[in-house]
Image (cartoon, rainbow, N blue to C red):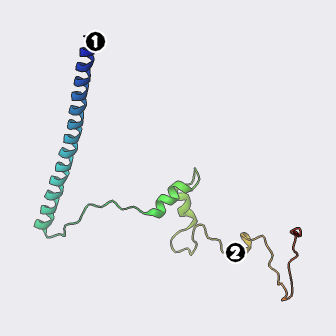
Amino acid sequence: MKNFIHQIFRLVFRVALLLVGLVFVGSLLVVAVLLLGLWLVRAMWARLTGRPVAAWVFKVDPSRQWDRFNLGPGKREQDIGRAARPGSGQVTGVTSNVADVTDVVARDIGPHHQPKDKSPNRSM
């Protein structure tokens, strides 16, 4: 008796999961058909008015996504916009003076200069 009830419960559970899956797939199909119908109405209206039929697109600017995730908290687009206004000639993140980012003084090395070998001699 216990085994029979267990099998009935498993069958009911599987049927319920199947129905939930079918409802989900059906709702996705309904949404897809509604979007297709909306796009077709939009395309027909564009043809009737003589306008070109434009596709629906989602434009992504990779540099904006990079700025969004890699700037620290508290940095907003208006902060970035203040630093580089159009026509000001200033670009955000670029410094004009190399000494601001370099702490090494370059010097000329003669043609016969040999660096000292600091590794210990290993003779075998």
- Against 97, residue 11 (above or below) is above
Q: Residue furthest top?
A: 1
The N terminus is located in which quarter? Answer: top left
Number of labels in the image equals 2
The percent coordinates of residue 99 (x first, y second) are 74, 73
Mark toward the start of the polypeptide (1 vs 2): 1
Report helix, strand or loop for mark 1: helix
- Against 25, residue 77 (above or below) is below
The percent coordinates of residue 28 (x first, y second) are 22, 44
Which kind of residue does numbered mark 1 sit on? Lys
Identified at 89% across, 70% down, the residue is: 121
Identified at 22% across, 41% down, the residue is: 25
Pick the residue in front: 59 or 19: 19
Q: Residue furthest bottom?
A: 111
Q: CA distance from mark 1 to mark 2?
A: 83 Å
The C terminus is located in which quarter? Answer: bottom right
Residue placed under numbered mark 2 in the picture = 97
Residue placed under numbered mark 1 in the picture = 2
Identified at 50% across, 59% down, the residue is: 66
- Against 8, residue 72 (above or below) is below
Q: Nearer the viewer, mark 1 or mark 2?
A: 1
Which kind of residue does numbered mark 2 sit on? Asn
The percent coordinates of residue 21 (x first, y second) are 24, 36
The percent coordinates of residue 117 (x first, y second) are 87, 74
Identified at 19% across, 67% down, the residue is: 53
- Mark 1 crowd level (few <14, some 14–19, many ≥20, 10 Å Cα): few
Report helix, strand or loop for mark 2: loop
One can see residue 77 in this view:
no
One can see residue 91 in this view:
yes
Pick the residue in front: 76 or 101: 101
Mark identifier at residue 56: none
